Amino acid sequence: MTEYGKFLSPTGRHLHESAIRRMGTVAARSAEMVSFAAGYPDPTAFPWSELRELAAGLLSGADPTVLQYGPTRGHEPLIGTIVELLASRGIIVTAPEVTITTGSQQGIDLVGRVLVTPGDTVLVELPAYTGAISAFKNAGARLAGVRQDEDGIDLEDLDAVCLRERRAGHGVNLLYLVPNFQNPAGLLLGLDRRRRLLEWAERRDVLIVEDDPYGALYFDDDAGTERTRPIRADDARGRVIYLSTFSKTLAPGFRVGWMVAAASLIERFETAKQSIDLMTGSFDQRIVHEAVRRGVLDRLAPVLRRLYRTRRDAMEQALAEELGGRLRWHPPKGGFFLWATLPDGIDDETLLARALEERLVFVVGSAFYVDGTGHDRVRLSFSAPSVDRIREGARRLAAAMDRASARTARVGMP
């Protein structure tokens, strides 16, 4: 057999895999596996009949461009629709400041390609979304983590880390964060901290990459549209690159997201995108455009908020009943994830090994930390499994923790 290692480029030799995708693959191997791993939307909530009707109309052949190549920047009517959607979020932009992406993950990748010089430091939250960790590492970036508290990213630590990296001779041009119901910690960045973050970015001459896939999925009125107001909405100096997606609200299979940035940056992102995929799928964009235009998304949003609030409540109740206080967490006010702290003496990887024996999978906390810590945390996703599966998963997690505790006790015996 040919040995391919010698053919790999430096980038090819050091590609970083997403831990979330890896655990999703494990879950897919067996129907008996309960998955608290991947943050998938519940497919029973997809608007199947309405999408079927939209697809039939688009595939009538009346418009031959539906299945044709299109502009790299995206389907113009969809861009116009996104401009209107952004205005409802307080972001006032024009079409030249928007480009369609193949999911918001591609937006992160484009940021890495266009704005990261190998060796630069990208600032990220502790913990941070693993897809962003992979994308920036694959772009050759160093990653420096910034602590969070209950109100989101710690601005004092942010400034200290930025200055430390610059004193060490590293370029620091980007901060990546998820302000609304952060993946994985579920935190909601405070409004005052959002404003101060813009002031900090101007003072330190840093661009903010704001990733906002979960902002519409708040569970309570006190975490609603005002508290989820994008950082970009108050950005008067063009410091924020805003990413979002239809994956969590309409359906992830369409792979339709978008980027908002200064027009001059959008031009660079568009050029980079040309060499990756030429364009996001025309048919997918048309479906999404029609779904938004006809009000499908508006009707769906409150349904999703009720659904995922019910799932969160079910997971919190099941964990409390089955684990009796051995896990600790802050109740998430939106999004897909419960971020739990393990009891002393049990680490995330040991618990995962025992959980797999119980046919349960989740994502280890250490996968979200760029500083080697996080082994006392796990991310449990409540969005996809039914309430019954959540309860069963909690029972399996309790059994796995019992086995992990017993193993730890045996290892610690004299």
Image (tube, helix red, strand yellow):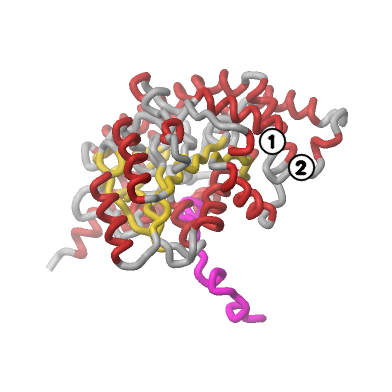
| C-beta proximity under 8 Å, tags 2 and 1 | yes
Q: Quadrant of residue 104?
A: top right
Residue at image location 33% in from the left, 37% down from the top: 187
User: What is the magenta range?
Assistant: 1-23
Q: Position of residue 253 (x, y in %)?
A: 63, 40
Quadrant where the N terminus is found in the figure: bottom right
Instruction: Give the number of the mark in front: 2 or 1.
Output: 2
Q: Position of residue 149 (x, y in %)?
A: 25, 41
Judged left or right of residue 218, residue 85 is right
Q: Residues within 10 Å of mark 2 (few under 14, many from 20)?
A: some
- The secondary structure type at the circle numbered 2 is loop
User: Which residue type does callout 1 highlight?
Assistant: Gln
Residue at image location 63% in from the left, 34% down from the top: 95
User: Which residue type does callout 2 highlight?
Assistant: Gly
- Of mark 2 and mark 1, the one earlier in the sequence is 2
Residue at image location 48% in from the left, 51% down from the top: 131
Please check the rendered image and state whether residue 19 is part of the magenta-colored stretch, yes or no. yes
Frontmost residue, 363 versus 7: 7
* Residue 8 appears in view: yes
Q: Position of residue 356 (x, y in %)?
A: 41, 53
In the picture of the structure, the residue carrying the numbered disc 1 is 285
- The secondary structure type at the circle numbered 1 is helix
Quadrant where the C terminus is found in the figure: bottom left
| Label at residue 309 | none
Q: Relative to residue 97, is residue 400 depicted above or below?
A: below
Q: Position of residue 132 (x, y in %)?
A: 46, 52
Q: How many marks?
A: 2
